[in-house]
């Protein structure tokens, strides 16, 4: 076998292993959260930018009872709401299929989370394809009377994501996440 043929086979093998790894990660989203826990998050976000204002999206309002929140389903059955991220109001979509809280670049800036180009060290599957993301630790996320601190998340590159996703790194820290008909119940 020539060295060119061996190199070609090696390239195909590496591509196949990479594709298998990506497919496994996408079908086992908890793996990403575990990797993020081991890798650590280089950006700690508890800064504020006083020039930023609230996000206009995410119209649903949440009914509150104690340390629980009930969200009504919106258009197409999605659960859209507003949360406080580091004290700033951000529109989100609750997404149990997302391993982590995934912030858009603009929402991250609004919440005082500023990342540099060198912080985009990981990749993630988004609705728009594969995007580079920057791992972060979000100091505080509040929805109604529920507060979760030190939440693992990622920031997508500018323009890579259309909406911030409230994923399992937040939801998994709650005592109850339950869908009842067209309502989603969250309890601390």
Image (cartoon, rainbow, N blue to C red):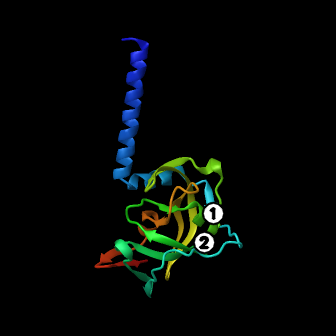
Q: Which residue appears at 38% of the width and 55% of the height?
A: 29
The location of residue 103, given as percent across then percent down, is: 53, 62
Which residue of the protein is positioned furthest toward the bottom in this rendering? 65
Q: Work out whether mark 2 precedes mark 1 in sequence or the reverse, and give the earlier one.
A: 2
Which residue of the protein is positioned furthest toward the right in this rendering? 50
Which residue of the protein is positioned furthest toward the left in this rendering? 181
**Mark 2: few/some/many CA within 10 Å (<14, 14-19, 20+):** many
- Helix, strand or loop at mark 1: loop
Asked whether disc 2 touches disc 1, contact meaning CB atoms under 8 Å apart, the reply is yes
State the residue position of label 2. 86
- Helix, strand or loop at mark 2: loop
Indicate which disc residue 43 carries. Answer: none
The location of residue 79, given as percent across then percent down, is: 40, 74
Above or below, comparing residue 146 to residue 156 in the picture: below
Residue 100 in view (yes/no): yes
Above or below, comparing residue 4 to residue 180 in the picture: above
Q: Which residue appears at 40% of the width and 24% of the height?
A: 10
The location of residue 100, given as percent across then percent down, is: 46, 60
Above or below, comparing residue 56 to residue 125 in the picture: below
Which is more toward the observer, 24 or 157? Answer: 157
Q: Which residue appears at 58% of the width and 66% of the height?
A: 107
Q: Is residue 36 left or right of residue 187?
A: right
Query: Whole-Å distance between the Cαs marked 2 and 1?
Result: 9 Å
State the residue position of label 1. 113
Q: Is residue 118 left or right of residue 40?
A: right
The location of residue 69, given as percent across then percent down, is: 42, 82
Residue 176 in view (yes/no): no
């Amino acid at each position: 076998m020539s060295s060119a043929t061996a190199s070609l086979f090696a390239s195909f093998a590496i591509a196949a292993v990479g594709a298998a790894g990506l497919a496994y990660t996408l079908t086992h989203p908890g793996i990403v959260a575990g990797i993020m826990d081991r890798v650590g998050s280089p950006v700690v976000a508890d800064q504020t930018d006083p020039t930023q204002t609230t996000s206009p999206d995410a119209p649903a309002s949440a009914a509150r009872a104690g340390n629980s929140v009930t969200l009504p389903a919106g258009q197409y059955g999605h659960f859209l709401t507003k949360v406080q991220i580091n004290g700033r109001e951000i529109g989100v979509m609750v997404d149990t299929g997302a391993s982590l809280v995934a912030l858009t670049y603009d929402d991250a800036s609004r919440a005082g989370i500023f990342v540099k180009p060198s912080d985009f060290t990981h990749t993630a599957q988004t609705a728009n394809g594969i995007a580079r993301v920057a791992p972060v630790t979000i100091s505080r996320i509040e929805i109604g009377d529920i507060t979760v601190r030190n939440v693992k998340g990622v920031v997508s590159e500018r323009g890579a994501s259309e909406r911030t996703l409230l994923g399992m790194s937040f939801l998994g820290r709650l005592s109850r996440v339950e869908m009842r008909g067209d309502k989603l119940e969250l309890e601390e």
